[in-house]
Amino acid sequence: MYQLLGKLPDRHRPISVEVVSTQETDELIIEKLLLDINGLERVPAYFTKPKNKPGKLPVVLFNHSHFGQYEVGKEEFVRGRPEMQKPPYALALARAGYAGLCIDSWCFGERQARKETDTFKEMIWQGQVLWGMMVYDNLRALDYLETRPDIDTRRIGTMGMSMGSTMAWWLAALDERIKVCVDLCCLTDYQELIKANGLGLHGIYYYVPDLLNHFTTAQINELISPRPHFSLAGRFDPLTPLPGLMKIDQELKLAYQKDGAPSAWQLRIYEVGHQETAPMRADIMAFYAKWL
């Protein structure tokens, strides 16, 4: 699967980090970082952890969403967004005892100097894939977490909504260091998306050349088994056609049953569209409390 992601930078190049600033609130420590992880452009990030909680902490690699709002990026993690519940996940995770890390993906936040379509087109010319470069940066973010003395590397989770949801399950499929995966509102069956004429609903970043000749969505997600995986979807969300969710659920139930972990896979469908509700937030935090 990794080979489908185009020409990527050296997976083992050295990582360096600059701490730009550190902010403390009553509950939270927020480090703003610049990570040199791909050799092409430095990657802004937020690392957060609960205040006054010593020792090694479990951590969640949070993947921000898209929504066509390129200026937001990693700010979603510390400031939230209207489509998600309050408090922002940086604080919600800290209150539960978790550290967190969120980077700006290509074309977002402090990396939005170039348009997504322009970046995608130039990368295709270079033999690169925008989604592959996004995935690469997040895999290297995992490498960075392993260098931190305050992180329990045996307890790494990942999550995200929308584009961040897709990133979460791709990362978990590619890297077994991720022990728990939570995806919110974007477990999309590719073939059912085509049938529903929904290709225009996803950004150009989403499309990986030759992918459908090798993998279905369910087959990618089967690579996560038997590690815990919680998927949350809105019944009325056009980005995740319901027949596709049912197909994925059936296949993953079989995979997790075969691997001896039937309770580690959960799909829940809520009576909403493309948004996070209060019950969703509560269920996510309960899942982390159980498995991470």
Image: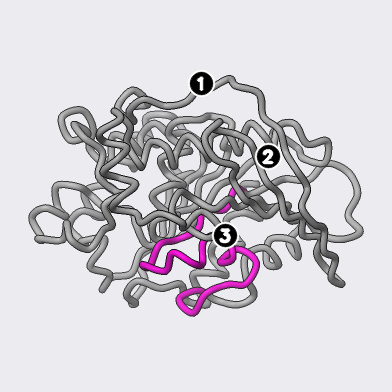
Residue at 34% of width from left, 42% of height from top? Answer: 253
The image shows residue 194, relative to residue 35, as above or below, that is below
Q: Which is more toward the observer, 118 or 231?
A: 118
Residue at mark 1: 10
User: Which element type, helix, strand or loop, lies under badge 1?
Assistant: loop
Q: Looking at the image, tell me whether mark 2 or mark 3 is earlier in sequence order.
A: 3
Residue at mark 2: 155
Amino acid type indicated by mark 2: Arg
Question: Residue 153 location, x and y as percent?
Answer: 71, 34
Residue at mark 3: 74
Q: Which is more toward the observer, 178 or 28?
A: 28
Q: Nearer the viewer, mark 2 or mark 3?
A: 3
Compute the Cα span from label 2 to label 3: 22 Å
User: Which element type, helix, strand or loop, lies under badge 2?
Assistant: strand
Secondary structure predominantly adopted by residues drawn in magenta: loop
Question: Residue 229 location, x and y as percent?
Answer: 47, 46
Residue at 33% of width from left, 41% of height from top? Answer: 252
Where is the N terminus found, in terms of image quarters? top left
Q: Is residue 72 magenta?
A: yes
The image shows residue 8, relative to residue 284, as above or below, that is above
Magenta residue span? 61-84
Amino acid type indicated by mark 3: Lys
Compute the Cα span from label 2 to label 1: 26 Å
